Amino acid sequence: MSTTDTFDAIVVGGGPSGATAADDLARAGRRVLLLDRAGRIKPCGGAIPPRLIRDFAIPDDLLVARVRAARMVSPAAREVEMPIEGGFVGMVDREVFDEFLRDRAAAHGAIRRTGTFHRFERDPHGMATIIYTDPDGAEQRVRGRVVIGADGAKSQVARQCVAGWQRVRYVFAYHEIVRSPRHGSGEGLAAFDSARCDVWYQGKISPDFYGWVFPHGETTSVGSGSARKGFSLRKSVTDLRAAAGLAGQPTLRREGAPIPLRPMKRWDNGRDVVLAGDAAGVVAPASGEGIYYAMAGGRFAADAAEAFLATGRATALAGARRAFMRLHGRVFWILGMMQWFWYSSDKRRETFVKLCRDPDIQRLTWDAYMNKELVRSRPAAHVRVFFKDLAHLLGFASA
């Protein structure tokens, strides 16, 4: 075992959340270790909204596609197109995107090391000590005044350090990266548009979530997710590829991973550990969106860690969850209710897709997604949407 280095902050996990936290703390002048396991790519549609591009200074050359519409597909194979007025959603390749974020943190002073987190201990003085295995299999030991656990769903840092980890529930996501077909090829549901994301709301594709076809320029992510035990996601994706005209496209890689269903009740240990990203459960219900919320959570974790380092008050670490939930908690609650109600049967999915034809719903949906906040500037539209939803919920409107 190596001699022990000491850092102001140790960030375990180098995905978007951990890399953001490490970058922010390094910019603040802290001595930071970013510990990441090599070769891991999370299954992800790769969509990033303008708010993320703006808040986290993402350069244009990382965008492999610009999506300008979404197509919803109902259980009865009805299609609803939702164009984005005057904007776009950026698409990134997670392998390239995540490495850019890690490199940026290193450029600002964070020390990068490759290794797998093994266990959490304390030295004789009570300082947090991380034991990890390096690429050669040797066990290494480092100390930190504060530790940020950004090591993904089913986080080992959370398991060893933060109460309540065992109550987190997960949906499992699986996708296949295929070679993109030619833009404009195919017809009907098999029509491929390189500037459009397709979302399939069909129980045979997912009984409690959805399937997706997200273009990434030369490649396309085709995936599905479900919390239903025994449901075959591989068969689901095979069926989706056939329906979307992608069965014959070459498969470049396959990936699967658990995704948390809701934020944990607590993100810190009350002493010197705070969680971020999937480790804290910040994946949006209904949509499964995680990149923006992971990076926002990483920034809040860095802010909380900096406050702790500056003051020595462990209570500062709880500020990460408070800040995140103050901004996004209401949206998560609404999305959770949407998923619980609209995804519960094909009859309700059919109605949900029909509702997506409504121009008011489309505008409010895109405004909320692109800017990551509930839109309060359209009170009349909110009232109209409320009564339309109510009519459908009470059965006054036909599906």
Image (cartoon, rainbow, N blue to C red):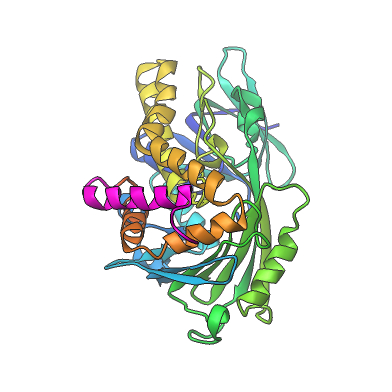
- Residue shown at the point (32%, 45%) measured from the top left: 374
Residue 282 lies, in percent from the top left, at 50, 40
Q: Is residue 44 visible?
A: no
Q: Is residue 14 above or below residue 243?
A: above
- Residue shown at the point (61%, 17%) measured from the top left: 123
Residue 15 lies, in percent from the top left, at 53, 48
Quadrant of res 303: top left
The stretch of residues the image draws in magenta is 375-399
Q: Residue furthest front?
A: 396
**262 relative to 391 in the view: left or right:** right
Q: Is residue 53 above or below residue 136?
A: below
- Residue shown at the point (49%, 46%) measured from the top left: 338
Q: From the viewer's side, name the closer residue of 136 and 344.
A: 344
**273 relative to 397 in the view: left or right:** right
Residue 191 lies, in percent from the top left, at 53, 82
Q: From the viewer's side, name the closer residue of 221 and 299.
A: 221
Q: From the viewer's side, name the closer residue of 74 and 5.
A: 74
Q: Residue furthest right?
A: 230
